[in-house]
Image: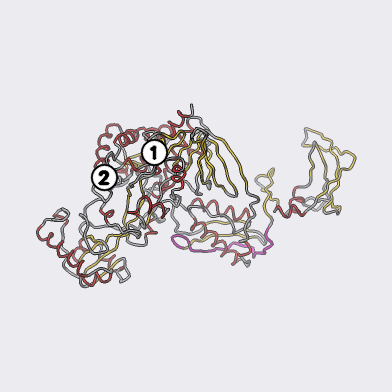
Amino acid sequence: MKKRITALTLAIVMVMGTVALAAGTEKTISVTAMNMTINGQAVTPTKSNGEAAEVFAYDGATYVPLRYLSELLGIQVEWDKDSPNTAKLVDMPTGLKFNAGTYTGTAQGNNGPVSVNVTFSEDRILSVELGEHHETYYLIPTPQKVIPAAIVEHQSLAVDTVSGVTMSSRAIINAVADAVKQAGADPEALRVPIDKGAATQTTENCDVLVVGAGLAGLTAAIRLKSEGLNVILVEQLGIVGGNCIFSTGNFFGPMKEEDIDTCVKTWTKQTSLNTPVPPQEGLPNMNKVEKIIHDSVRVVDYFENELGFDMCLTTDYTTTSADVTKYMLRPTAEYERYSSRGSQICFALRDKYLEQGGDLRLNTKATELLKDEKGAIKGAVCSVDNGTLTINAKAVIMATGSITQNPEMLKKYWPMRSGDWFSTSVGSTGTGLEMMLDQGAVMWDTWVTGTILVHDTPYLVRTTVDGTQVRGVKSAKALHVNTEGKRLINENHSREGEFYTVPDKASVLIEIMDTPLLEEVGRMDEFEAKASEKGPFYKADTIEELAEQMGMEPAVLRATVERYNGFCKNGEDEDFGKPAGSLIAIDEGPYYAVVDTLVGFDITGGVKTDINARVLNADGNAINGLYAVGLASSRDFFSTAYVGGGSLLIGATMGITAAEDAASYIGK
């Protein structure tokens, strides 16, 4: 666009004389008539009906017919009959010719085919509408809105994808390309990169900068706005929600004060279960644990009475939580059929923040923290589309998540889970933690992982369009072994899967069952349909054949099975104490096995902070102006095991805590 403008030389020459024109019926003005030349050639501008139009000057401005001049510069003017006083300037068509009409294009998406309905005129793409698809219900809305609008605006397929929803974004673009081809044009001609102009460097100021728009960041930003502060919330992806949008949406914690003690006891018990994570003195930090559980009641009150949310116990909608320790945002009709409702609370918080007039910057990645001469944090440098943005702030709250999408950091800080699959946000790259380490923060030396088990491709663990998850229905009655055929733990252990670790590879456990047991647990049809020598479901006439299919030493698996069967016969598990009621012998073929892959949904660790979320240095002193919340600082709430719903509780309570302390710090 700029090249065309540079190549076009316009000359407008003043002609002496005046013309009286009426502006509406209220004002008469005097103007100076002008002549116009283009590249030295005199021209007469025209109206849309072809009649000559006058060029004139008035009050220091020159007036030329908008359509005439715009189209000379390669810009098209559109008028909407419903908004007759508004002109829309858009790029001119690319020169392609289409067979006018509506076409349905299709391309492969994340979960299956994605179709779009594209309407063309002879020289333009007029509209793009998403058709049938099976994309993840809480991820697709953003690209569904953004990608079609960008394609129509730029008349191009070289539009940016929505970071965090890349595969679905590409599917929409490729489906439009399919429709372009059907309309008789070459889609490659529309893939020419869009000229974004020269790189920019800008600076802005605010009271508090919040980095990361997950649950913790959104909660902190809303609390700050309610204090009347100037807040900028930046998010490196094109969507909000962080890890929370992949969650069930269940918060651990009480809704009422009378349930606080019960929740403290339950948290302490669940986080102290025996796992491969070594116990550490002082963990969990009970001062912090008791704080967030007490603050849970305040969060519920704040969500309900300040933000207008309807919170309820999860037992209102599910039988998986049978007590008062879990609550959630009451599902709307849209969300009632889904098992994963974390996106509902995140999107509700986003909408509330925007209603407050909140400043949300998507696709804005913080890369470096700024500090003053005394070492206090005073803002950050951010990478934005086509340039950099420096944000000066009086305090910075880091809500940047964990390291699950950074293999190098995972291997360095938590090698036990190196190589594992994680169903977490692609934004969990650890860059925020690295920024804080550069300013003297201290990382925890052990971490805790929450896991689920899946039978099929781990990538499919993400919730599908119908709200179900491709996760294993692990049977505690089965015999569980590792890849060597050895049993490691009581199969009834709630975090049993965490014992089956494989360094630098996806960690798995293997369920072994015989025919009667498989029939008892009601999974015979599933195994019969899926069993093959390629796995992950296996079937064999003997234990030895089963071991060979899975690459195990047959004698090792045979010895494990025989020892286990002995415990079943005697009614006592001498190795791990499995209850007698769950001890069922594996002794009647055919024999079956399924490989359950461990998929992490949270990893708690991050940098060390005090009870007010202030980041600490190696001397244990707070780094002025710097806060870390959510998974960016979560290790000392846990001992050896993760507590379900814990990360949501930490995010909401510590987000509010950091916001209130930051407001006090800057003198609000």
**Dot 1, how many residues are within 10 Å of its Cα: few (below 14), some (14-19), or many (20+)?**
few
Residue at the extreme top: 667
Q: Quadrant of the N terminus?
A: bottom right
Upstream in sequence: badge 1 or badge 2:
2
Give the amino acid at mark 1: Ala
Q: Which mark is residue 309?
A: none
In the structure shown, which secondary structural element does the residue marked by tag 1 occupy?
Answer: loop
Picture coordinates of residue 442 (x, y %)?
Answer: 39, 41
**CA gap, disc 1 and disc 2:** 22 Å
In the structure shown, which secondary structural element does the residue marked by tag 2 occupy?
Answer: loop
Picture coordinates of residue 22 (x, y %)?
Answer: 81, 37
Is residue 519 rendered magenta in the image?
A: no
Residue at the extreme left: 570
Residue extent of the magenta highlight: 93-112
Query: Hey, which quadrant is residue 557 in on the image?
Result: bottom left
Q: Name the residue rendered at 35%, 62% in the picture.
A: 456
Picture coordinates of residue 153 (x, y %)?
Answer: 62, 53
Q: Is residue 378 above or below residue 583?
A: above
Q: Which residue is mark 1?
A: 618
- Classify residue 42 as left or right of residue 614: right
**Dot 2, how many residues are within 10 Å of its Cα: few (below 14), some (14-19), or many (20+)?**
some
Query: Hey, which quadrant is residue 311 in on the image?
Result: top left
Residue at the extreme right: 16
The image shows a total of numbered marks equal to: 2
Give the amino acid at mark 2: Pro
Q: Is residue 280 above or below residue 27?
A: below
Q: Which residue is mark 2?
A: 279
- Classify residue 130 as left or right of residue 2: left
Picture coordinates of residue 183 (x, y %)?
Answer: 61, 65
Q: Name the residue rendered at 70%, 51% in the picture.
A: 77
